[in-house]
Amino acid sequence: MNRQRWAAAGAVAVAFVVAGLVWFRPWALWVDKTVDEALPSAAPRTASAGESSPRVPTAPVTVAHGTFISHEHATSGAVKIVRLADGSHTLRFEGLETSNGPDLRVRLSDAPVKEGRAGWFVFDEGQYVNLAKLKGNKGDQNYQLPADLDWSAYTSVSIWCDRFDVSFGAARLVRT
């Protein structure tokens, strides 16, 4: 009878350890994924009937920019929103460096970027949009903004850990 209890307790302990490993994914903190994407290019929008030339420039134009600050994990790099020749917009990270983690997202938010621990949890309040899963925790990467998204309504971007509801790092978006 005592052996059965120990066996059951051992099985429960193993189940908890496995579940904890799956949930927390601690190995992700030591595994880096580097992404090296070039700025996307898009064909210029053609002029409509009666127009003499396209209304948008043919070269990409930075319309907002910012610099990451650290929150839960050390984070650095630049972020910008770029208007492409076809009028679409892309969110771009350049020189991003942060820790890897479980379920990291790129989140646009109307929350203010705050230094230190005060800024860790503000990006799930107010308005926000989860753009995509973070492609990698290092390097240059692009995230196309949906055509129907009014990006100007959002003042910040966060590397957001959806699993633990915490910001790894964030940047205030400044219009140029």
Image (cartoon, helix red, strand yellow):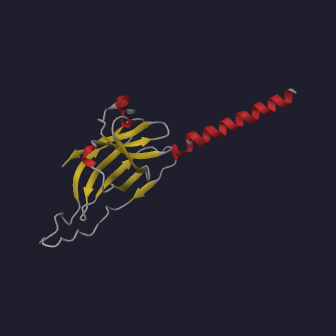
Give coordinates of residue 46: x percent, y percent: 21, 71
Q: Residue at x 39, y 33 (%)?
A: 121
Residue 2 sits above or below residue 172 on the image: above
* Camera-nearest residue between 48 and 74: 48
Give coordinates of residue 60: x percent, y percent: 23, 61
Taking 169 as reference, is 7 left or right?
Answer: right
Q: Residue at x 39, y 53 (%)?
A: 139
Q: Quadrant of residue 119?
A: top left
Give coordinates of residue 153: x percent, y percent: 26, 44
Taking 50 as reference, is 136 left or right?
Answer: right
Q: Quadrant of residue 62?
A: bottom left
Residue 148 sits above or below residue 85 on the image: above
* Camera-nearest residue between 44 and 9: 44
In the image, farthest residue toward the top? 2
In the image, farthest residue toward the front? 49
Give coordinates of residue 111: x percent, y percent: 31, 36
Taking 52 as reference, is 26 left or right?
Answer: right
In the image, farthest residue toward the right? 1
Q: Quadrant of residue 85?
A: bottom left
Q: Residue at x 37, y 49 (%)?
A: 96
- Count of numbered labels shown in the rendering: 0
Quadrant where the N terminus lies?
top right
